[in-house]
Image: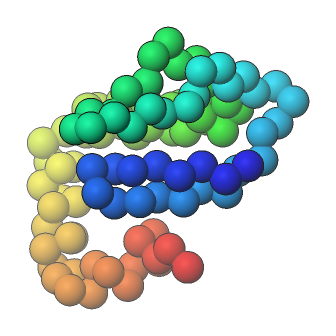
C-alpha cells in the first residue's frame, strides 16, 4: 500500500503492508480548497499500538525523572554539543 500525506505542504510517501489484524476504515483524505477533511476514520494497527505503548512508556519515564536526573541528562547533552548528533541513539541509518 502506498499512502500519500500532505502535511501542510510537505508530501510524505509511506509504503505500508496492511496486516491481517489491522483495520482501516474511511481513511481516504479529501483535499478541498483550503481544507483537508477526514471523516469518521478508524485505524487499528499493531504497529500503531506498539508505537503508542512506547510513547506512553517514554512519557511516564520522563515524568518520573527527578530534578537531579533531569539536570544530569541536560548537562550530558550540553557537554556533547554538536557531537550529540553522532551518539548512537540518535543515528537513523
Residue 78 appears in the figure: yes
Of residue 82 and residue 1, the one placed in the foreground of this image is: 1
Horizontal arrangement in the rendering, residue 90 relative to residue 1 (left or right): left
Residue that extends furthest to the top in the rendered view of this protein: 40
Horizontal arrangement in the rendering, residue 3 relative to residue 5 (left or right): right
- Image position, residue 70 (x, y; %): 18, 50
Quadrant containing the C terminus in the rendered view: bottom right
The total number of labels drawn is 0
> Quadrant of the rendered structure where residue 50 is?
top right
At x 44%, y 32%, the residue is 30
Horizontal arrangement in the rendering, residue 65 relative to residue 86 (left or right): left
Figure check: 87 above or below 23: below
Of residue 91 and residue 45, the one placed in the foreground of this image is: 45
At x 54%, y 59%, the residue is 13
- Image position, residue 28 (x, y; %): 56, 31
> Quadrant of the rendered structure where residue 90 is?
bottom left
Figure check: 22 above or below 71: above
Amino acid at each position: 500500500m502506498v499512502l500519500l500525506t500532505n502535511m501542510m505542504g510537505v508530501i510524505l510517501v509511506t509504503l505500508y503492508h496492511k496486516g491481517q489484524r489491522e483495520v482501516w476504515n474511511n481513511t481516504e483524505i479529501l483535499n478541498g480548497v483550503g481544507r483537508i477533511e477526514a471523516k469518521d476514520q478508524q485505524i487499528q494497527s499493531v504497529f500503531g499500538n506498539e508505537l503508542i505503548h512506547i510513547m506512553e512508556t517514554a512519557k511516564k519515564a520522563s515524568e518520573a525523572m527527578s530534578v537531579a536526573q533531569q539536570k544530569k541528562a541536560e548537562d550530558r547533552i550540553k557537554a556533547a554539543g554538536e557531537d550529540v548528533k553522532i551518539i548512537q541513539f540518535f543515528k537513523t541509518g
